[in-house]
Image (tube, helix red, strand yellow):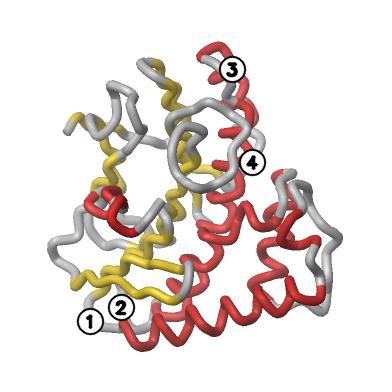
């Protein structure tokens, strides 16, 4: 998906924050913060990309494996976190990379902005003191951009990540138009969205994917959309747009 197609960047209401894009190579973040932190965020993108790229250089399996890889106590912290989440979920570690970068950057700048949104390829790390809404995009589904998640302020950040088998560049073996996972960690949410998306082959597999999501304590809620069908579970409130 090229930058011109990043329509989902209007998907989270943020009129009270300063919003801007930060880009480096394939990483293209949309950031909303109380103050301009663009230069710091770009520095952190380079920092985390260099860690991941250098680890891949000496451990190429980390990039290509579709299954968890062996945990490495000597790996950089962001790589360890990706390994831990992928091991719990049962996916390859790179299935968590977009959420991991968004989450780690969000944690790094959290002391400088008490409210923030870091979006990386549609995967969001969000910390808020006010109610916000996240619009759900589901490709050609009649439900696409017709409903939004109501996000309530909490004392913890949110990871809001989406996987699709019908649009975008991420690898999916399923047919869902959108699998959106709301959790306390964007790294975990990203990996689980991929896993659940792989399970959704048709409308009858939506309940099975939801039961799979229920196994994980980190999950706050899940929304699955396939055509005109939708499955919802957890502490999720949907509103019509």
Residue 167 percent across, percent down from the top left: 43, 38
Residue at 59%, 20% in the rendered image: 201
Q: Are marks 4 and 1 in contact (CB under 8 Å)?
A: no
Foreground label between 4 and 1: 1
Return the residue at label 3.
Answer: 205
User: Who comes first in sequence, dot 2 or dot 3?
Assistant: 2
Q: How many marks?
A: 4
Foreground label between 1 and 2: 1
Identify the secondary structure beneath mark 2.
loop
Foreground label between 3 and 1: 3
Judged left or right of residue 70, residue 62 is: left
User: Who comes first in sequence, dot 4 or dot 3?
Assistant: 3
Label 2, label 3: how far apart the Cα atoms are: 41 Å
Judged left or right of residue 28, residue 239 is: left
Q: Quadrant of residue 89?
A: top right
Label 4, label 3: how far apart the Cα atoms are: 18 Å
Residue 199 percent across, percent down from the top left: 63, 27
> Neighbour class for label 4 at 10 Å: few (<14), some, many (≥20)?
some
Q: Are marks 1 and 2 in contact (CB under 8 Å)?
A: yes
Residue 216: image tag = 4
């Amino acid at each position: 998906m090229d930058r011109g197609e990043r329509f989902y960047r209007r998907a989270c209401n943020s009129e009270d924050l300063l919003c801007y894009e930060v880009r480096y190579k394939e990483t293209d973040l949309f950031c909303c913060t109380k103050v301009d932190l663009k230069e710091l965020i770009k520095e952190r993108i380079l920092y985390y990309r260099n860690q991941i790229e250098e680890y891949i250089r000496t451990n190429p399996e980390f990039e290509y494996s579709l299954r968890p890889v062996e945990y490495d106590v000597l790996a950089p912290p962001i790589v360890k976190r990706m390994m831990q989440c992928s091991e719990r979920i049962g996916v390859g570690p790179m299935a968590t990379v977009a959420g991991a970068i968004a989450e780690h950057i969000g944690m790094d700048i959290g002391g400088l902005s008490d409210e923030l949104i870091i979006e990386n390829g549609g995967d969001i790390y969000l910390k808020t003191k006010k109610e916000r809404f996240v619009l759900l995009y589901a490709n050609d589904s009649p439900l696409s951009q017709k409903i939004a998640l109501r996000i309530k302020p909490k004392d913890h950040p949110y990871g809001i990540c989406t996987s699709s088998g019908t649009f975008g560049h991420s690898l999916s073996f399923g047919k869902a138009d959108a699998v959106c996972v709301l959790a306390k960690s964007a790294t975990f949410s990203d990996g689980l969205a991929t896993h659940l998306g792989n399970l959704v082959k048709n409308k009858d597999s939506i309940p099975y994917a939801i039961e799979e999501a229920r196994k994980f304590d980190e999950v706050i809620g899940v929304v699955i959309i396939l055509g005109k069908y939708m499955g919802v579970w957890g502490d999720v409130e949907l509103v019509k747009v």
